[in-house]
Image (cartoon, rainbow, N blue to C red):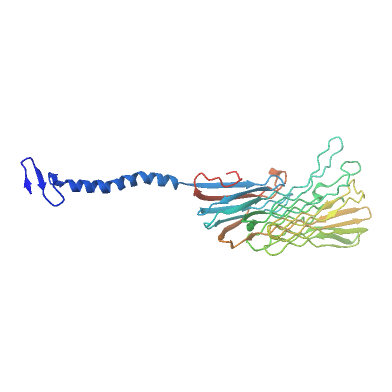
């Protein structure tokens, strides 16, 4: 080895001579170049990897429209995270109708692409029976039930009844309201979450002077548990004392459905002596089977008899049961008539539909965290019609995916 005065050092060896300046070997620089290339490449590749791994939160909301249900489907991609849902059953129709359930919860991350179907319920309608003269007619609105995962039962109407006076007139509250439909999320075609619909109001009326109902029958509210039965309102009840006699008519509401049973129709009874009595039972609800929801039962219908008392002839019907997993029972109707002096209809409200939550569907685990009443029964703001249900789903997945037909 020799050192020159300009600071250049020569190194002799078998591999030949190399030159080092200022104490830094050229071999070291070559080695430095060798490891610096991957670092540069890594620095360039990292932003590309980050861009390809960009994630996005997807949200989907579907609502019913009037009595019609809203339907759509999306695909939750494999590896999606933060999956949450809210499923709301339809509200019942009528002055004192019942509310649907609001179900909130989460699902685990699926290992494979998963198809999810939305069924957002329609709300039940409040009946509207014209009472005005032919010169100013109002449209007839029947208490139809809402569609959904389980249709809400209806408060029926006699299609043969005239709608004008004189001498015919009708009492509008005598016709029951429709039950709200059930709403649902189905995972790969299997029901995962079902929210029951509210029951419809039971129509009750009388045509005697000075008479008034002791109680009227409300539509039932959906249950606040995943397995329990929907509620029922009080019985419709009339009582009148005259000529030393006590006479009454009673109609119990339909019972609520649950995750394992459908609701029964309400019972009826009367006390005292009457010239004419009739009982028309509502129908029971049905239980869900496979991908078909449980329907609410229709209310019983008392057709127009043609008997006029105090310028009224009454017809009416019980309230429809709410749809859901177990459909609620329809309200029955009790009619009594006494020597052209009294004509009374007592009709029960519809029972609410039942909820349901599957523990899992395949590898997808469902954890429902809260059940409340949606507060969507008929009100003056909605012309006493039940508010339709909604279904909401949210999750995080890779950005820019086309996941289905629902509107985000």
Q: Position of residue 361 (x, y in %)?
A: 59, 61
The x, y position of residue 270, in whole percent, is 85, 62
- List x then y, in percent, for residue 147: 72, 50
Residue 375 seen in the figure: no
Q: Residue furthest left?
A: 5
Q: Residue furthest top?
A: 135
Left or right: 83 in relation to 309? left
Image quarter in which the C terminus is found? top right
Of residues 284 and 11, which is closer to you in this image? 11
Return the x and y of residue 264 as percentages of the image width and height.
Answer: 76, 62
Q: Is residue 246 above or below residue 206?
A: below
Left or right position of 31 against 269: left
Left or right: residue 81 compared with residue 7 = right
The quarter holding residue 194 reads bottom right
Q: Is residue 317 above or below residue 48?
A: below
Q: Farthest residue toward the bottom? A: 260
Q: Nearer the viewer, residue 157 or 362?
A: 362
Number of numbered discs present? Answer: 0
Residue 176 in view here: yes
**Residue under the point 69% across and 44% down:** 65
Q: Is residue 273 above or below residue 48?
A: below
């Amino acid at each position: 080895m020799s050192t020159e005065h300009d600071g250049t050092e020569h190194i002799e060896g078998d591999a030949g001579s190399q030159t080092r300046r200022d104490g830094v070997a050229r071999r070291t620089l070559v080695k430095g170049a060798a490891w610096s290339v991957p670092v540069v490449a890594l620095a360039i590749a990292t932003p590309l990897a980050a861009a390809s791994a960009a994630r996005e939160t997807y949200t989907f909301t579907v609502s019913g429209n009037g009595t019609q249900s809203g339907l759509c489907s999306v695909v939750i991609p494999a590896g999606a995270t933060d999956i949450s849902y809210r499923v709301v059953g339809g509200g019942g129709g009528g002055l004192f109708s019942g509310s649907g359930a609001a179900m909130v919860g989460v699902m685990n991350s699926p290992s494979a692409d998963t198809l999810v179907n939305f069924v957002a319920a329609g709300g039940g309608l409040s009946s509207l029976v014209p009472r005005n003269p032919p010169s100013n007619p109002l449209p007839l609105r029947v208490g139809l039930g809402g569609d959904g995962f389980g249709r809400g039962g209806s408060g029926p109407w006699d299609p043969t009844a005239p709608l004008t006076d004189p001498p015919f007139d009708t009492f509008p509250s005598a016709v029951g309201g429709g039950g709200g439909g059930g709403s649902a999320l189905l995972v790969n075609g299997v029901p995962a979450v079902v929210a029951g619909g509210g029951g419809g109001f039971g129509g009750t009326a009388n045509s005697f002077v000075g008479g008034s109902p002791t109680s009227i029958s409300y539509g039932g509210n959906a249950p606040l548990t995943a397995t329990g039965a929907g509620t029922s309102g009080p019985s419709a009840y009339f009582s009148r004392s005259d000529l030393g006699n006590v006479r009454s008519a009673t109609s119990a509401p339909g019972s609520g459905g649950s995750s394992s049973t459908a609701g029964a129709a309400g019972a009826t009874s009367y006390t005292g002596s009457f010239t004419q009595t009739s009982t028309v039972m509502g129908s029971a609800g049905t239980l869900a089977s496979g991908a078909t929801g449980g329907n609410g039962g229709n209310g019983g219908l008392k057709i127009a008899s043609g008997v006029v008392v105090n310028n009224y002839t009454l017809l009416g019907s019980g309230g429809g049961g709410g749809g859901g997993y177990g459909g609620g029972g329809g309200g029955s109707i009790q009619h009594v008539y006494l020597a052209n002096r009294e004509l009374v209809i007592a009709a029960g409200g519809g029972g609410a539909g039942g909820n349901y939550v599957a523990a899992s569907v395949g590898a997808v685990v469902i954890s429902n965290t809260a059940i409340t009443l949606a507060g969507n029964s008929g009100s003056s703001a909605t012309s006493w019609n039940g508010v339709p249900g909604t279904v909401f789903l949210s999750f995080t997945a890779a950005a820019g995916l086309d996941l289905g037909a629902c509107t985000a």
